[in-house]
């Protein structure tokens, strides 16, 4: 038997910080990271044999629950025929067709062609290259607090892990590359208008999280995405909708399908759910735009593992099982947990807001709902570490950062939800007793 402390010590001797992704180090919650060895349904089990109800869900992909039998079987069947071929497979086409068919609203079909890649970072990076190639412009506009992966031009004011580490960006990004990205406040249409008035002829695209989930949940203001699209298109630029987190999670067509005001993105990026837990992401858009990608067009993108048959099998099977009943279970569980968390914090006298985007939600320790990155950073984030540790001590695994969304799955049954709800009062009291130092 080993312990989490022993595993972390060993990991630090082999990997920078002992992790392969910074938030896993549990630094912002002042706790030893848990090293998991198995998972099933709504549960994960660490090296010490302790089981937790999981609200991380592999950061979103485990939407059906961990190790869903149909997904596991699909991957096993695919593996039996070969782990990869470096060549085309029928499964790639089937997944691309499935993605395109699901992303529709009121007869509109913004995704006519799909390119499969391996990560969300790769998807957004490729979407930006494609937008620059299509418009022959260089500048990209992003919003402070939105995270679009770790490619060089997108780490400024990036939220999520960068916010957790209190970093304004990243070392190693050359200034001339950073200068190609213009960062403006989120939910501020006047700022959008101003940046286009100043630099509109040079702006290739605006990239935006469909419903931001990397600085906690900060929903778009009513009609924000629709007006954003209008401004962008009026200046001949493209709108890149980042649905890496929200795509196929908050509904069959992602946030695009449930935004209260319909709008028209030019390119859409997907990740997390679309790969069913294996490394897979995608870019979609009109045939005209997407066929600017090689081999048909001048915008180059390639990947040895793009469309890997195991990942394709996991993604297809996950999407096949995400029917109306599955979404109803996820939505109901998310509502129960979010409401219970808000109630427990209110009872403990802790200022908070439970913000939601579909079935994604997060707790922010503020008097009023944050609307942008500055207001997110102004919250009493120091209340989250004791809240997190109290939940962990009671067998509930939350995201190890206040700047992350909570993820519920279709496998969170009444028993799992009840265990979470029962743990919340003690966690709320721990948050109430916290001090800023």
Image (cartoon, grey):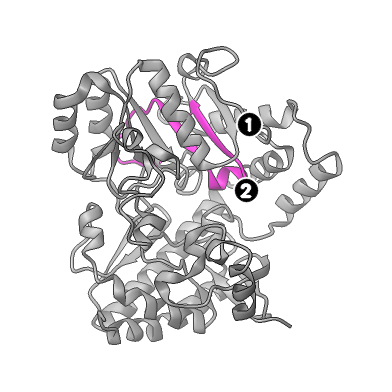
Mark 2 residue crowding within 10 angstroms, few (<14) / some (14–19) / many (20+): many
Above or below 290: residue 360 = below
What element does badge 1 sit on?
loop
Tell me, yes or no, whether the highlighted magenta stretch contains residue 404: no
Neighbor class of circle 1 (other Cα within 10 Å; few <14, some 14-19, many 20+) is few
In screen coordinates, is 223 left or right of 414? left
- Compared to residue 323, the image places residue 59 above or below, namely below
Residue at horizontal 73%, vertical 25%? 88
Q: Which residue corresponds to the image point at 48% horizontal and 64% vertical from the top-left?
A: 333
Residue position for label 1? 303
Residue 48 image position (x, y, % from top left) = 67, 81
Discs 2, 1 touching: Cβ within 8 Å: no
The residue sitting at 40% across, 23% down in the picture is 131
Q: Specify whether 144 is left or right of 266.
A: left
Tell me where residue 153 appears, x and y as whole percent. Answer: 38, 37
Viewer-closest of 231 and 389: 389
The quarter holding residue 84 reads top right
Quadrant where the image shows the N terminus: bottom right
**Does residue 100 sit above or below 163 in this rendering?**
above
Which residue is the site of mark 2?
276
Q: Where does residue 312 sit, x and y in percent of width and height?
A: 68, 39
- Image coordinates of residue 226 in percent, x first then y, are 27, 32
């Amino acid at each position: 038997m080993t312990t989490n402390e022993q595993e972390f010590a060993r990991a630090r001797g082999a990997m920078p910080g002992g992790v392969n992704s910074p938030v896993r180090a549990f630094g912002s919650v002042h706790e030893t990271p848990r090293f998991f060895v198995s998972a099933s349904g709504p549960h994960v089990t660490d090296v010490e044999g302790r089981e937790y109800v999981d609200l991380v869900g592999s950061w979103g992909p485990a939407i059906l629950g961990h190790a869903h039998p149909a997904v596991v079987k699909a991957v096993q069947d695919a593996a039996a025929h070969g782990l990869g071929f470096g060549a085309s497979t029928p499964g790639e086409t089937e997944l691309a067709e499935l993605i395109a068919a699901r992303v529709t609203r009121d007869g509109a079909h913004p995704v006519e062609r799909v390119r499969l890649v391996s990560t969300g970072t790769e998807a957004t990076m490729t979407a930006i290259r494609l937008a620059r190639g299509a418009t022959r412009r260089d500048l990209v506009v992003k919003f402070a607090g939105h995270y679009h992966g770790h490619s060089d031009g997108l780490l400024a004011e990036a939220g999520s892990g960068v916010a957790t580490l209190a970093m304004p960006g990243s070392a190693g990004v050359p200034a001339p590359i950073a200068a190609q990205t213009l960062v403006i406040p989120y939910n501020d249409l006047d700022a959008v208008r101003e940046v286009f008035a100043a630099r509109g002829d040079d702006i290739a695209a605006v990239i935006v999280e469909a419903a931001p989930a990397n600085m906690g949940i900060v929903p778009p203001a009513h009609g924000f995405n629709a007006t954003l699209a209008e401004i962008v298109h009026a200046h001949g630029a493209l709108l890149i909708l980042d649905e890496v987190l929200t795509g196929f999670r908050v509904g069959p067509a992602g946030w695009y399908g449930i935004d209260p005001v319909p709008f028209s993105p030019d390119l859409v990026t997907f990740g997390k759910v679309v790969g069913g837990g294996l490394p897979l992401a995608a870019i979609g858009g009109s045939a005209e735009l997407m066929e600017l990608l090689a081999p048909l067009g001048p915008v180059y993108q390639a990947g040895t593992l793009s469309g890997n048959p195991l990942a394709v099998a996991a993604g297809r099977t996950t999407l096949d099982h995400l029917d109306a009943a599955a979404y109803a279970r996820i939505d109901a569980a998310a509502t129960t947990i979010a409401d219970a968390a808000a109630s427990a914090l209110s009872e403990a006298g802790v200022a908070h807001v439970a913000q939601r985007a579909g079935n994604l939600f997060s707790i922010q320790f503020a008097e009023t709902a944050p609307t942008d990155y500055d207001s997110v950073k102004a919250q009493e984030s120091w209340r989250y570490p004791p809240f997190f540790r109290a939940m962990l001590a009671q067998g509930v695994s939350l995201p190890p950062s206040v700047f992350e969304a909570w993820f519920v799955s279709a496998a969170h049954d009444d028993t799992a939800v009840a265990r979470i709800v029962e743990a919340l009062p003690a966690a709320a009291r721990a948050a109430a007793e916290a001090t800023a130092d």
